[in-house]
Image (cartoon, grey):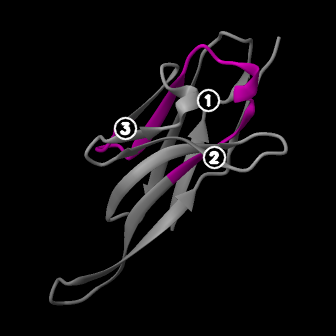
Amino acid sequence: QVQLVESGGGLVQPGGSLRLSCAASGSIFSINSMGWYRQGPGKERELVAAISSAGHINSADSVKGRFTISRDNAKNTVSLQMNKLKPEDTAVYYCNADLTVPLQTYDSGYTVKAVGVYWGQGTQVTVSS
């Protein structure tokens, strides 16, 4: 089983900062990309930022210059440093991982693997004065 556990959400005033962290655990063969999505009140879930295993970053225009995503491949963690927060950043933030899991290993050493997308439980970020 794979689990993504998030931490770091909360209430902050406009202009403030928060740092979100997410740790992936369980039976993982490799992690292809990790990232953060968010869903605001009455809105669809949207990409905030994602980072590949090679360090390539894709982020929403609305957060460029304010949010920074980073990843520790050795620890299977991804973090999102959020600065200069605005009320419109208020949302539930979800950790996301595109990863490969082992299904079965044969005596020959060959391992059958599967690729899947996993989500954390979400953490609330509220930006308000």
For label 3, the residue is: 71
Q: Earlier in the sequence, mark 3 or mark 2?
A: 2
Secondary structure beneath dot 2 equals strand
Asked where in the image residue 103 lies, by quadrant, the reply is: bottom left
Examine the rendering and report whether any part of residue 20 can be seen. no
Secondary structure beneath dot 1 equals loop
Q: Nearer the viewer, mark 1 or mark 3?
A: 3
Q: Earlier in the sequence, mark 2 or mark 1?
A: 1
Give above or below for 104 relative to 17: below
Residue farthest to the bottom?
107
Spatial separation of the CA atoms under disc 1 and disc 3: 15 Å
Spatial separation of the CA atoms under disc 2 and disc 1: 19 Å
Q: Is residue 88 left or right of residue 113?
A: right
Confirm whether the magenta stretch covers residue 4: no
For label 1, the residue is: 8
**In front of the other: 35 or 113:** 35
Q: Amino acid at mark 2?
A: Glu
Spatial separation of the CA atoms under disc 3 and disc 2: 20 Å
Examine the rendering and report whether any part of residue 40 can be seen. yes
Local crowd size for mark 3, using a 10 Å CA cut-off: few (<14), some (14–19), many (≥20): many
- For image coordinates 28% across by 44% down, the residue present is 74
For label 2, the residue is: 46
Q: Which residues are magenta?
A: 71-96
Q: Nearer the viewer, mark 2 or mark 1?
A: 2
Confirm whether the magenta stretch covers residue 78: yes
